Image: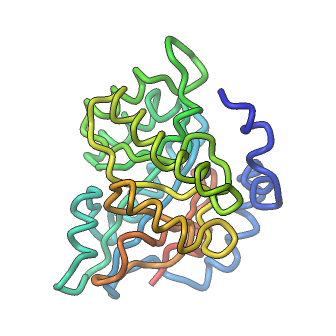
Amino acid sequence: MSPHFATALPGPRAWLRARPQLQGSLVAPAGARHRLPHRRGGLHVVLYHDVAGRYERNLLAHLDALLDRGRFLSWPEALIALAGPAPLEVPTFSVTFDDGHKEWAQSVLQLLQERNLPATFFVTTDKVVTGDSQTQLTWADCAALVAAGMRIGSHSVTHRRLIELSDAEARSEVVASKDELEQRLGICVEDFSIPYGLPGSDFGERELGLIADAGYLSSVTALPGRNLAGQSRYQVRRCGLNPAWPLTAVKQRVHE
Ligand SMILES: [Zn+2]
């Protein structure tokens, strides 16, 4: 594991993310004014990280509520929908997970399979361990996700904020993570999740150029909102959720 992880998640966003029930209770009141998507078209991409055991069934409750409102697309289907030319006439959804968590292989995969849902897992390669581990995501876990038909993307090597790195360092984060995933898993890695994911503070034109030059076909952000046909595939919006949240908090992020 990289020494960068000790300092990679500073700031209020990370503090609140580590207290998901508090975060959910803060987000929920604004959600009460909203309805889940039901009529307006668009692609809503949801983003989770870890899924603690006590929140597994709550994650399913989130996904069931969205399933009630529209279809879930695999990532290739989502990119075709975004490419247009037909407008997205109904709400559609796609689910993604970021960073690299043991629960992905221990429980999340099984939950997704219960509902026959495709998902994309964006892996920070330095977080993955070689050999066995009961607590950390291993390369065998990643291979199991691939074998189950899940999509794997890159989430950089060390999860540093790309915009703060030199050209050579930023390029290495984007390229070396892709290379390692491809070599270890025997797959093509075509999708990148930008660490922290907000335009201006976390990425800009240079980073988007590096991602495209490395051969990625899409990149996802942490900018909330729905995606429409015809927009850029390199700045896909995602709604960050936590499995600990009540449904009213989900509606604050994913709504009509
Ligand atoms: Zn991340």
Residue at horizontal 68 percent and vertical 55 percent from the top? 165
Left or right: 113 in relation to 253: left
Coordinates of residue 228 in the picture (x, y in percent): 34, 82
Q: Quadrant of residue 26?
A: bottom right
Left or right: 50 in relation to 236: right
- All told, the count of numbered labels is 0
Residue at horizontal 29 percent and vertical 49 percent from the top? 118
Q: Quadrant of residue 129?
A: top right
Coordinates of residue 59 in the picture (x, y in percent): 50, 49
Q: Nearer the viewer, residue 87 or 192?
A: 192
Residue 237 visible, this angle = yes
Residue at horizontal 58 percent and vertical 72 percent from the top? 204
Residue 98 visible, this angle = no
Q: Is residue 159 above or below residue 135?
A: below
Q: Nearer the viewer, residue 7 or 41?
A: 7
Q: Quadrant of residue 197?
A: bottom right
- State the residue lying farthest toward the left: 86
Colour mode?
A: rainbow
Q: Is residue 35 above or below residue 57?
A: below
Q: Nearer the viewer, residue 59 or 136?
A: 136
- State the residue lying farthest toward the front: 168
Residue at horizontal 47 percent and vertical 61 percent from the top? 210
Left or right: 211 in relation to 124: left
Split into 4 quadrants, where in the image is the C terminus? Answer: bottom left
Left or right: 159 in relation to 8: left
Split into 4 quadrants, where in the image is the N terminus? Answer: top right
Coordinates of residue 124 in the picture (x, y in percent): 54, 40
